[in-house]
Amino acid sequence: MKRAESSNSETDYETSIYETPMHGTPRTRQRILGASMELFGVRGFHETSLREIAERVGVTKTAVLYHFPGKADILAALVEPMLGDLAAAMANAAAAGPGRARWAAIEGMLDVWLKHRYLLRLNLQDLALATPGPAFARFRDAMLRANALVAGADPGLAERVRAAQAVAMLSDPVVLFADAPVEGLRAAVLDGVHRLLDGTAEPAAEPPPAPRSRRGRPAAMSTAMIETARRMHAAGSGATLIAAALGVSRATVYRHLPPAAPPTP
């Protein structure tokens, strides 16, 4: 996110007008949110102070407090779109009916995580959403609702545990591979969840071919990409899913997978 820049004269002007709270503007509110997102991403929510946010924007701490009574309120404003999408996804899943609610909840939550993947990565950096404040209760309630929908009606302990595992495994891949092509990443995550809950992969989860850019797909993979490909392969993912998730061709994936074991005599 681009840092807000201003000359010294502009900074002095904004600082002076914000000594009087009545001069608060929506534009400054957005700049505070943008600066907070930057600082939370670099330093973490807990290590970032309101004074640092004010200095980044070029206003006084009093001006920041006029728009947001505290850091938790800044976090609540940043995550509001994600929480709204999550609540809507769970409501849609609940309305889908008993036979469809589980997968509607899983797919709906995954789509929310993919849409807000960089904010989700910020949260996992220091568990900012676990901080008591306006956002915490809504986030907690949405996660509990998702677990209940995935577990199904009258679940036992085993079903509740398996549901918690399924919900939990939606977020980590999105955070770790936030820069991967979204469609391929979505297909790979759903493939893993189907294997956990059903014992098999869903054939329809195969992703469509990723669009080629004018430069084509990368012909080489980094060490981290190779390790990821091998882990996915060991877990049972095919070359098509791996290639889509990493944004490379299947031929590139095959070059880095271990050779198939010879048949046992």
Image: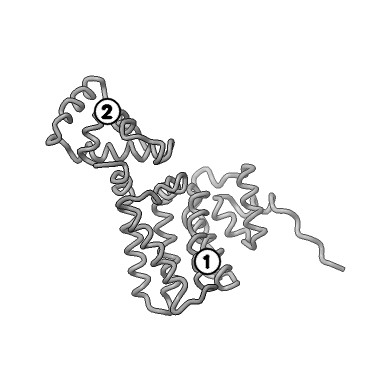
Colour scheme of the picture: one colour
Q: Estimate the x, y position of residue 200 in percent, counting from the top left.
A: 60, 71
Answer left or right for 234 relative to 104: right
For mark 2, what is the residue?
58
Towards the viewer: 184 or 9: 9
User: Which residue is at a point 19% across and 27% down the rendered structure image?
Assistant: 14
Q: Residue furthest right?
A: 265
Answer left or right for 145 relative to 188: left
Q: Amino acid at mark 1?
A: Ala
User: Which residue is at a point 45% across and 79% down the rendered structure image?
Assistant: 154
Question: Residue 191 has which mark?
Answer: none
Towards the viewer: 186 or 162: 162
Q: Is residue 210 above or below residue 11?
A: below
Q: Quadrant of residue 2?
A: top left
Q: Estimate the x, y position of residue 5 in percent, counting from the top left.
A: 30, 28
Q: Amino acid at mark 2?
A: Gly
Q: Estimate the x, y position of residue 191 in percent, counting from the top left.
A: 55, 65
Question: Residue 205 has which mark?
Answer: 1
Q: Estimate the x, y position of residue 246 in percent, counting from the top left.
A: 56, 51
Q: Is residue 199 above or below residue 17?
A: below
Location of the N terminus by quadrant is top left
Answer left or right for 260 relative to 3: right
Answer left or right for 164 relative to 251: left
Neighbor class of circle 2 (other Cα within 10 Å; few <14, some 14-19, many 20+) is: many
